[in-house]
Amino acid sequence: MPSTLSNPLRLGLRQERVIPPQCLIIFGASGDLTHRKLIPALFELYLQRRIPSEFGIVGCARRPWTDDEFKEKMQAKLTDQISGNENEWEQFSNYLFYEPVDLQQSEHLVRLSKRLNEIDKSQATHGNKTFYLSVSPNFYGSGCKALKAAGLIDDPKKSRIVIEKPFGRDYSSAKKLNRIVQSCADESQIYRIDHYLGKETVQNILVMRFANTIFEPIWNRNYISSVQITSSETVGVEDRAGYYESSGALRDMLQNHLTQMLAVTAMEPPGKFEPEAIRNEKAKVLQASKLADENEPWNCCVRGQYAKGGNSLKRLKDYRDEDGVNLNSTTETYIATKVFVDNWRWQGVPFYLRTGKRLPKRLGEIVLTFKDVPVHLFESTIINPAPNQLIIRIQPNEGATFKFEVKSPGSGMKSRPVEMEFSYDESFGEPSDEGYVRLLADAMLSDPTLFTRSDEVEAAWKLYTPLIELMENSPWKLPIHKYESMTWGPPESDQLLSKDNIFWRRP
Amino acid sequence: MKPQLTLQTPLELPYEEISNYLNKLWISEDEDSSGANTFTLMVWQPSWLEQCLVQSGLISGPITGTLSPEIIKVAKKLIVDKGLSHTTSVNSEQLLTLLKGNLSNKNYEDLRGQFFESSISTLNPRRLITLAPTLNKKPEIKTFVSAYCPLSDNTVTQSICGDLVVIRGDSNSINKKGLKIIDELSIKDLPTWLWWNGSLNESQEIFNYFTEHGIRLIIDTANGSPKRCLKILDESIRSNKAINDLNWVRLKSWRESLAMIFDPPSRRPILDHISDIDIDIAEGNILQALFLISWVSDKLEWLFSKIENHGELIKIDFKRKNGEKISTCINPVPLGNPSVHSGQVIGLRLISKISEVPKNNTCIILGCESVECMRLEAGGMADMQLIEQVVPNTFSSSESDVSKLLGSSRGNTSPLFESTIKVAVQIFNNITNQD
């Protein structure tokens, strides 16, 4: 009897787009991201039969590895995923190549170019190339210049560059980097990746909003009183202190992931589902966004840093005691801010965004709170009737919940809130792909819909410029508040909302 | 989608010169325009119904090759006027035979091969070759050539151009002379597709020419006898030749709707206890229903045990690996206004018996409209847990289905279709009356 663990009638029914023949070149192939996300995502695409037979993956880094060493190292890192798929890995590893490259050495690029020509012939990839810059952000600009100088990205139809986040450190550096990158390649060749956009649930926001008639009429200032966007992690800085110390929660999460969620939540409906139409609307909404108090931004932002915590079984360190962290560090591991979107749809509706490390739960969610009813006809079983809420869960337990009032059973006419639930697991029963699976495939398919365009990136940085300037010039005005590890951030973040008579949702 | 017309009036050339002319065309063109590096699409475009209606004076020309709403309307009226059964399909041989008895010998403007829906032209086929057989006996072959550049919304990208060739003459002359040109027109290194946009029962010599030349095929098994259609499908997969079927493509919403019911893991156990499946189809070709049953049985690993004809009704039994029997039934229903495609599925009822107590069992009903759902609900189905869904029967045009196939195919037969064909052939070979 066939296994009903997965839906047997679903097998083979999903028609995925086929990735055209090409060579994917990963710079920074010895780094963490390559074996943690990129190669697993490519192997997953292979298992889904979406990788064409004419394909090649060329790892590039400074280490003097050979093709075989690269294959062995990847195999060693992917043991869990390979287990049970050994034959498939054997086949897949035939696509793996390695070339030692230092992007700053022009002769290395010349050697790479020759090697790519050989691989192009042996793998029949028709000269199609996707370059993935998984290198330190300091090398994005020089990396693009090196590729341009080597003539590797001259053909806009046959070459693409994928650039990891963070794209710049602030508005001016992002603008400068955009200028450099755009002088090397057409905007149509540039894919700025934000893996949050690869998540099924983030994309589902677009479908929920624009494929249903019931949401759009109420998706505005007339019915929605506030929006909360949360992305929380339970982990601390782990082994990323070197990067995190210079970035912090604002640059690491707020400016990109949370702001992209804001954009898809608040954007206007695009005229058609085409990359530029969608990116136009996202860019417009970001350009219309501003901090709730741009002149005195300390009034609309709270920064925090995790302190000790945990329990007797697991003691958790203070951020400043973590390996690689400055003992007097003022890097924020938590940030909460209030934003307004200055347009007809959202005028006056506060958007509260918060993200942090060492919070009690790992989750991402968007909570739309609707306005209260004009007259309370019914007494509530709790103190006050709860306003309707639509909660979109990005992770975990992906799905959505709608909270509304019903009559509480009994002889009286009291109301109480109940929840109407949609869960990906219960409805589809199959895990959705990792964000990188979707985004790598899209980049190789030349589909930029889920990648951020230059104007979006700049608008997102511009939005937080008053905060960044404050943090750099007058940091005492935006102090770091310590919070106990595994709590929901510093108490000051609650005050940010309580001023408006609102509370953070406790998920 | 509006049809796209060539910008250049097709040039009539002697067929011996066509190949040379096309070779020169791309060399002399503006350097900014390049011939698309995509595929060649050949179309067998008899459009017999349209030709008959034009030559009978029932509709005005020119002949375009598109099955327009006007043609369908006139043909349906004719079916009623001529006293044919209301369930007769507009593509039926009966109707054509009737029309052929009353034709004029006038010549009409023939634009076949010059009209292509934008869904196809925007895929930028490198070469479009239309084989346009004429009703009138024309021993001479006429050939026309034109270049085209589909207009794109994106003004930045340069236009990607292709060319089109029309080969016109009667079936006999196309068979004798036209096919010779085809060989010369094939572009090395680019895949070639043939869309057989006509009945699979006719012009078998011409069809066989294409199957023998390893060309990727797109057929429509709603248009041809089940025996002939299954033979073609079976031979193609046995010889590892790529074949696609629009009748299978049109089944997609049924397959998707049925699969969707079982997406929630809580419903999966229903699949282990299916006891009955009844499929209602519009009277005519049974293949689409047979595909649907074959697909389900293949995915659930049932073993075929027997098939019986009970008049129009066809009963097919399967066994699960644990020996439990599953009864399925294909039930042709007379419809007053059938689809232009013969034998389309209009309803499905699936019963899963988990116990002797009806309310613990499940009945799943898919219907093309709520009336069909209500019909399938009759007979005590409501005593069971009922899951109902309407599968809208809004057919897209054949051109649009072809473009979806061309845009998504990897150039092979879909593995899902291939395994379905194998089961369908096994079942059909046991049928007593195969016509």
Image: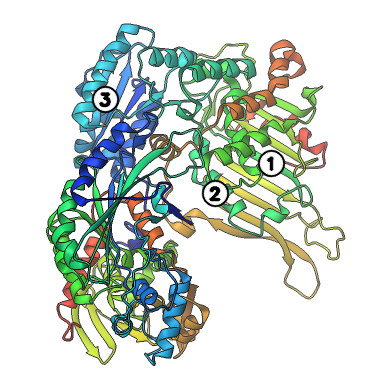
Disc 3 is placed on an element classified as helix
Q: Position of residue B263 (x, y in %)?
A: 42, 61
Residue A73: numbered disc: 3
Residue at coordinates 71% horizontally, 41% vertically from top-left?
A: A504
From the viewer's perspective, tell me whether residue B241 is left or right of residue A239.
Answer: left
Report the amino acid beneath label 3: Lys
Residue A159: numbered disc: none
| Same chain, labels 2 and 3 | yes
For label 3, count other residues whose C-alpha is less than 10 Å away and answer few (under 14), some (14-19) or many (20+): few
**Mark 3 and mark 1: span between their CA atoms?**
42 Å
Report the amino acid beneath label 1: Gln
Report the amino acid beneath label 2: Asn
Q: Which residue is mark 1?
A: A228
For label 1, count other residues whose C-alpha is less than 10 Å away and answer few (under 14), some (14-19) or many (20+): many
- Reading the chain from its start, which is encountered first: label 1 or label 2? 2
**Mark 1 and mark 2: span between their CA atoms?**
17 Å
